[in-house]
Image (cartoon, rainbow, N blue to C red):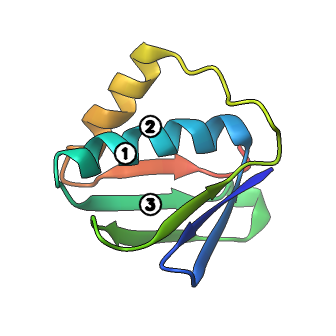
Amino acid sequence: MGRFIYDSTLIVILDDEVLGYLQAVIGAKFRLQQSFYFSWGYPANTGESRTTVWLTPGVAMQFVYRGARPPALDRDRVNTLFAQANSPTGLVLIVGA
């Protein structure tokens, strides 16, 4: 499991593959100087809820991977997630599903 760290204060634990997709989408959006919502939730049986943050270029973030090799990404899935990030609700992930 890797970590997504935003503004040095917010840490989200994610699978390396999911983290790779997140890095690809955030990188693409920020290259276009676009901000967007990023939300993540947890399966209902965990008792956790949902969190939403506004991601914007210029705020420090880190993608910390557990594994040494970059995950292989599916271009169609990257495009789907990018389109979701362009929607009014932004990019939504379910952690631990």
Separation (CA) of disc 2 from disc 1: 5 Å
Amino acid at the residue labelled 1: Gly
Tell me the residue that label 2 is attached to.
24
Q: Residue at the spot x=36%, y=74% of the render?
A: 59
Q: Residue at the spot x=48%, y=79% of the render?
A: 7
Separation (CA) of disc 3 from disc 2: 16 Å
Q: Nearer the viewer, residue 20 or 91?
A: 20
Which badge, 3 or 2, comes first in the chain's sequence?
A: 2
| Disc 3 element | strand
Tell me the residue that label 1 is attached to.
27
Tell me the residue that label 3 is attached to.
39
Q: Is residue 95 left or right of residue 89?
A: right
**x then y, percent, for residue 62:** 57, 62
Mark 3 neighbour class, 10 Å CA radius: few under 14, some 14 to 19, many 20 or more: some
**x then y, percent, for residue 2:** 74, 53
Whether the residues at callouts 2 and 1 have beta carbons within 8 Å, the answer is yes
Mark 2 neighbour class, 10 Å CA radius: few under 14, some 14 to 19, many 20 or more: some
| Disc 2 element | helix
| Disc 1 element | helix
